[in-house]
């Protein structure tokens, strides 16, 4: 058994790990799947990827207990294959996989079915159609590169996904404990994730991370969708040792650029970034100090996706539903 350092919040014990398997891959399940087991996949969708498949195969037959099939940029199909026939197809509402982007995925076996998390966010649930203990093989095919896959034997004893508890307390730079919901820990960069319930006034997004030692720039984008051509309501782009650019992307074109007066990010240094949503715009605090406000150019109700890219590693992303500035500044 080996330990995988996933974040500052948890150390996951990954057993029977397989590193960089050749695709297509067929592997044997080391022991029967049962509730409270999780399967971890870390990988990358190639730049020209169209779709890939992960199958939980049952017994010595060709039966598939769980068929997980992302069609990049289109849909994500869920199904089973029993007695030589595909069954009723289901689909997930959001496709979190993006061409050229890395991902972390956990498939948790529960008494009800297969609970799937992608990049720290609960993605879907597929109810059992065949007994999980019948699953004896994993099959991975298609346009995907897998860095590692492995098993977590006692999922409920881990604290990696704080969504299980719905809330996590994070110490801010002002020594105020912030109540964060829907946290995403240690996401792969570039990161593209749905904003749970969308943006609203009196809400804040908290991002804690580190600027890479050889960094040039990074960006945090509040977008109307996950695709490259979708509008960007707020583009926050620190260019290390130069300036911090603020902008929006609308109708396939960048708009008038603004700049923040100070660039508070340093190569190799950790940071705490808090982006509060007000009726006026996006109010940005870095390491406890107010940096800038970017006025709304696109209605908040159109914003659904958070995107982070560039020379940065992220420890945690979380959402504060009932933001009050005085709590942060006390």
Image (spheres, rainbow, N blue to C red):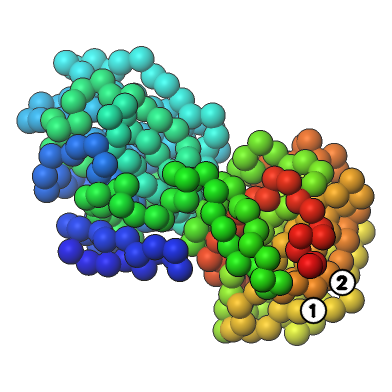
Which quadrant is the C terminus positioned in? bottom right
Q: x, y (%) of residue 29?
A: 14, 44
Mark 2 Cα-neighbour bin, 10 Å: few <14, some 14–19, many ≥20? some
Report the residue at 21% width, 23% height from top. Answer: 130
Q: x, y (%) of residue 52?
A: 38, 41
Report the residue at 76% width, 63% height from top. Answer: 328
Marks 1/2 in contact by CB < 8 Å: the verdict is: yes
Q: Secondary structure at mark 1?
A: loop
Asked where in the image residue 174 lies, by quadrant, the reply is bottom right
Q: On screen, 327 above or below 182? A: below
Residue 236 in sight: no
Q: Is residue 84 left or right of residue 170?
A: left
CA–CA distance in space, label 1 to label 2: 7 Å
Q: Is residue 164 left or right of residue 206?
A: left
Mark 1 Cα-neighbour bin, 10 Å: few <14, some 14–19, many ≥20? some
Report the residue at 25% width, 44% height from top. Answer: 37
Q: Which residue is disc 2 drawn over?
A: 260
Quick one: 243 or 199, which is closer to the camera? 199
Asked where in the image residue 257 lies, by quadrant, the reply is bottom right
Q: Which residue is disc 1 drawn over?
A: 263
Asked where in the image residue 271 lies, by quadrant, the reply is bottom right
Which quadrant is the N terminus positioned in? bottom left
Quick one: 107 or 297, which is closer to the camera? 107
Q: Secondary structure at mark 2?
A: strand
Report the residue at 26% width, 20% height from top. Answer: 129
């Amino acid at each position: 058994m080996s330990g995988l350092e996933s974040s500052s919040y948890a150390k996951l014990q990954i057993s029977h790990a397989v590193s960089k398997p050749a695709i297509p891959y067929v592997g044997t399940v080391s022991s029967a799947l049962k509730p409270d087991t999780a399967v971890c996949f870390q990988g990358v969708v190639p730049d020209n990827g169209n779709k890939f498949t992960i199958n939980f195969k049952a017994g010595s037959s060709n039966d598939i207990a769980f068929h997980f099939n992302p069609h990049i940029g289109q849909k994500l199909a869920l199904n089973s294959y029993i007695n030589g026939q595909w069954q009723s197809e289901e689909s997930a509402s959001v496709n979190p996989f993006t061409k050229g982007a890395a991902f972390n995925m956990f498939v948790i076996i529960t008494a009800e079915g297969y609970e799937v998390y992608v990049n720290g966010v609960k993605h879907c649930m597929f109810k059992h159609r065949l007994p999980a203990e019948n699953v004896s093989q994993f099959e991975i095919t298609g346009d995907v590169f897998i860095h590692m896959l492995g098993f977590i034997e006692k999922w409920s004893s881990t604290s990696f996904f704080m969504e299980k508890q719905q809330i996590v307390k994070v110490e801010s730079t002002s020594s105020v404990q912030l109540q964060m919901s829907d946290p995403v820990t240690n996401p792969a960069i570039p990161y593209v994730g749905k904003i749970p319930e969308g943006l609203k006034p009196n809400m804040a997004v908290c991002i804690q991370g580190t600027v890479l030692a050889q960094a040039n720039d990074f960006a945090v984008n509040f977008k109307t969708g996950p695709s490259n051509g979708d509008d960007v309501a707020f583009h926050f782009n620190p260019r290390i040792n130069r300036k911090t650019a603020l902008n929006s992307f609308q109708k396939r074109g960048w708009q008038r650029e603004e700049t923040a007066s100070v660039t508070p990010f340093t190569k190799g240094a950790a940071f705490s970034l808090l982006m509060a949503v007000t009726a006026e715009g996006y109010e940005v605090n870095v390491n406890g100090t107010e940096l800038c406000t970017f006025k709304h150019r696109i209605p908040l109700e159109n914003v659904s996706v958070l995107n982070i890219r560039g020379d940065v590693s992220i420890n945690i992303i979380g959402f504060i539903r009932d933001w009050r500035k005085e709590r942060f500044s006390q």
